Image (cartoon, helix red, strand yellow):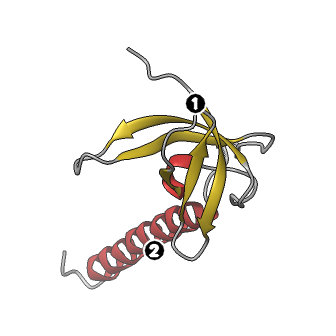
Amino acid sequence: MTRPVLKGVLKTWKEDRGFGFITPDNGSRDLFVHISAIGQVSRRPVPGDIIHYQVVRDRNGKFRAVNASIEGVSTGNQNTTNPLKLSFKWTVAAAVGLLIIIAGAALFYLHQRGLV
């Protein structure tokens, strides 16, 4: 069973902590939302944003927003690779390549000296 998508207004947002509270349109109590529930968006949330979300109950029995989106704000391209991840992959690839070259050079040296 899928959860219904609800709508509300972002009442508060603590940028330094990455969370805020949504005032639901249905009049229920304010609801916690974490930046991880919003995902990749072209800008950070600000108070007054219209938020579309689903509700789950966490391990402590409290309700929170998940699968949230900001109305009118485009989501990040899912095919875009994080530059830090790309940089890390290139660093690992370069390190592996360098190790292969060093091992090959060492083997060549030892072979020339008649040690292998």
Above-or-below relation of 61 to 84: above
Image quadrant assignment for residue 90 = bottom right
User: For the residue carrying disc 1, how many other residues have a C-alpha within 10 Å: few (<14), some (14-19), or many (20+)?
Assistant: some
**Of all residues shown, which one is farthest toward the left?**
115
**Of all residues shown, which one is farthest toward the front?**
27
- Whole-percent x and y of residue 23? 59, 47
The circle on residue 98 is 2
Left or right, residue 7 beside residue 90? right
Of labels 1 and 2, the one closer to you: 1
Q: Which residue is mark 1?
A: 6
In the image, what residue occupies the spot 51% across and 69% down? 94
| Front position in the image: 104 or 53 | 53
Above-or-below relation of 32 to 5: below
Image quadrant assignment for residue 25 = top right
In the image, what residue occupies the spot 44% across and 73% down? 95
- Whole-percent x and y of residue 19? 52, 63
Left or right, residue 41 beside residue 63? right
The circle on residue 47 is none
**Of all residues shown, which one is farthest toward the top?**
1
| Front position in the image: 14 or 74 | 14
- Whole-percent x and y of residue 49? 74, 50
Q: CA distance from mark 1 to mark 2?
A: 53 Å
- Whole-percent x and y of residue 110? 27, 81
Q: Secondary structure at mark 1?
A: strand
Q: How many marks?
A: 2
Residue type of the residue flagged with mark 1: Leu
Q: Quadrant of the C terminus?
A: bottom left
User: Which of the two labelled residues, at mark 1 and mark 2, occupies the earlier sequence position?
Assistant: 1
In the image, what residue occupies the spot 48% across and 63% down? 93
| Front position in the image: 97 or 43 | 43
Residue type of the residue flagged with mark 2: Leu
**Of all residues shown, which one is farthest toward the bottom?**
113
